[in-house]
Image (spheres, grey):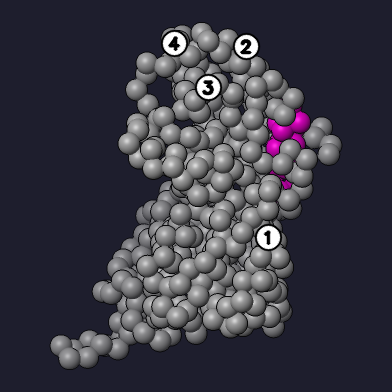
Amino acid sequence: MNYETEEAPYRYLVAGVDTQVPLANGNYGTYVNFDNAATTPPFNSVIKDIISFSPWYSSIHRGNGYKSQISSNIFESSRETVLNFVHADSSNDTVIYVKNTTEGINKLSFRLCTGDKKCVVLSTNMEHHSNDLPWRDKYKLDYIELDKQGKLSLKDLEQKLINYNGAVKLVTVSGASNVTGYINPIYEVAKLAHKHNAKILVDGAQLVPHSPVDMKPESSLEHIDFLVFSAHKMYAPFGIGVLIGPKAAFMQGAPDYKGGGTVDLVTHEYVAWNEPPEKEEAGTPNVMGVVALVSAIKTLTSIGMKNIDTYERSLAYYALSSIKNIKDIELYASSEDINNRVSIIPFNIKGMPHSIVSEILSLEAGIAVRTGCFCAHPYVQKLLDVSGEDISNYLRTDKSERPGMIRLSFGLYNSFSEIDYFLRVLKYIINNKQYFLNKYSNHTH
């Protein structure tokens, strides 16, 4: 892959990229953020649009005031912008606004099969907790196996669909893993699910901000029935998330949250619910969050999701090609296949606790990474080959002593020079391992 390109061509679009932070030596350094899989800083355009809209912010839906009408129009027209961004079918699908991906998945878990324990949901062994835990107490949940590299096994998925003989109602998979960055073959999963009369939910939190996503027409076997994602991972951190799915799926039954905005008519004896999406959006909507999301979508679209995908992939390739050759580095995802993953690199340094390494990177160099199990404990335990007995023992130890990884995750504003800086720091830490262990081992994590 050719990574000789303009240095950080989109960096100017993002707020705070040159922020100075204090270092352990008393000096200040430019903050290097390699923790974008957790959350991203805002686009400058998002901040600008929030400020521009602020004087017009008002109540929506039933307000007759001029500002209310403006706010209502912006809120409702935003749904079409979101649908178009992921090529959803506006004649079939609706956009339900939630706080984040987690709430979106939980909301669907209350609607699917109305809690029928005979209803089977297939998740995978690589999911974020948000795409695992909500299903456990409501349905029969089974997990699609992974191969030796930690990638999804389509063969096991197909076999489970056959074995359950039509009982599977939903196959729910991450679009891309927040641990390894592996991109799942969502359209192949969709074809298998639909062949067996099941629907598919894609957790798009790690995919939508980094690669083009097409939900495909309803008539296609590759159609994505449900998609969820969070604005705070796509440069609009103002508390909004999206659940997209067929309007018909939310027509029957009561919403999980009940209250203002969800009803058409109420007496002491009777409740008539609104139609979706209003039925699913209880309380005062997050109009500011919607303004931020639409602004971010416009900026991402103006850059082009394919361009973002290409640039971030070049960053990951550049970093990975060097990291894999550094002594004492343990990688937990394939170092060869960079074409089927987003820009995430999980690793450890032999003989150094992950929590200490992250602290050194932050305090000594101003570099932000994430460590631990990234809310995907079963997946990380598998990749680290942690036994069940060890897991039980870790419940009685300090959290800083538990196994985990260090995760690099790049955004469209990161640069090759930032990676060069990180690599120099990483080598320095390894070459002075004992010094740093002595210095930081007594810190409280």
Which residue is labeled 4 in the image? 439
Residue 1 screen position, x and y as percent: 83, 39
Tell me the CA gap for discs 1 and 2.
39 Å
Q: Which residue is outermost to the left?
A: 268
Residue 221 lies in the magenta-colored region: no
Rendered residue at 65%/49% (across/down): 150
Q: Amino acid at mark 2?
A: Asn
| Marks 3 and 4, how far apart at CA | 12 Å
For marks 3 and 1, the one nearer the N-term is: 1
Q: Which amino acid, mark 1?
A: Ser
Mark 3 lies on residue: 352
Q: Which-is-in-front pick, marks 1 and 2?
A: 1
Looking at the image, is mark 2 or mark 4 earlier in the sequence?
Answer: 2
Left or right? Give the position of 340 relative to 26: right
Say which residue label 1 marks. 153
Other-residue count near label 4 (Cα within 10 Å), few / some / many at <14 / 14–19 / ≥20: few
Does residue 212 appear in the picture of this structure?
yes
* Res 201 → quadrant: bottom right
The magenta segment: 308-322
Residue 436 spot, x, y in % from top left: 50, 12
Q: Earlier in the sequence, mark 3 or mark 4?
A: 3
Which disc is residue 344 wearing? none
Label 3, label 1: how many angstroms apart (C-alpha)?
A: 32 Å
Q: Nearer the viewer, mark 3 or mark 2?
A: 3
What residue would you read off at disc 2?
Answer: 431
Q: Residue at x 58, y 29 (%)?
A: 348
206 or 299: nearer the viewer: 206
The secondary element bearing badge 4 is classed as: helix
